[in-house]
Image (spheres, helix red, strand yellow):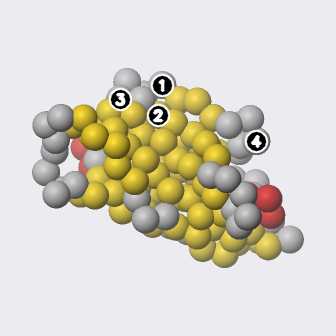
Amino acid sequence: QVKLEESGGGLVQAGGSLRLSCAALGSFFRIDRVAWYRQAPGKQREFVARITSGGSTNYADSVKGRFTISRDSAENTVFLQMNSLKPEDTAVYSCNALIFSPTARDYWGQGTQVTVSS
């Protein structure tokens, strides 16, 4: 059984930093692309950042220059380094991954709360 487990959320003041982790647990062949999404109260879920198996990245305009997505393939973990946080970054952050086990399937984590106070 494969699952994604996020960690690293919390409460931080505006201007601060947090590092989120998304670990893929279980038995599988490989992880393809991994993305972070977020959902604020009363809003639709929105894309934040994505990293491919080859290491290519892309970001939502709202986080460019502040957030960095990276991966540790040996540990099957993807990170989201979030700097210069703003109150509008407050949301539940979830990771999403395409994992081959052996066929390709989309997985979601349970989410981690990030709260930025002004």
- Which of discs 4 and 1 lies nearer the camera? The answer is 4
Sequence-first tag of 4 and 2: 2
Tag on residue 86? none
Report if the CB atoms under discs 1 and 2 are less than 8 Å apart.
yes
Query: Is any part of residue 16 visible from this angle?
Result: no
Query: Is any part of residue 5 visible from this angle?
Result: yes
Residue at (48, 25) in percent of width and height: 56
71 relative to 118, above or below: above
Q: Secondary structure at mark 2?
A: strand
Sequence-first tag of 1 and 2: 2
Report if the CB atoms under discs 3 and 1 are less than 8 Å apart.
no
- Residue underneath mark 4: 62
Q: Quadrant of residue 30?
A: top left
Q: Secondary structure at mark 3?
A: loop
Q: Who is closer to the viewer here, 56 or 48?
A: 48
- Residue underneath mark 3: 53
Q: Position of residue 4 (x, y in %)?
A: 34, 57
Tag on residue 56? 1
Residue at mark 3 to residue at mark 2: CA–CA distance: 7 Å
Q: Who is closer to the viewer here, 47 or 21?
A: 47
Residue 12 in the figure: left or right of residue 105: right
Sequence-first tag of 4 and 3: 3
Residue type at the position of mark 2: Ile
Residue type at the position of mark 4: Ser
Q: Secondary structure at mark 1?
A: loop
Residue at mark 4 to residue at mark 1: CA–CA distance: 19 Å
Residue at (32, 33) in percent of width and height: 32
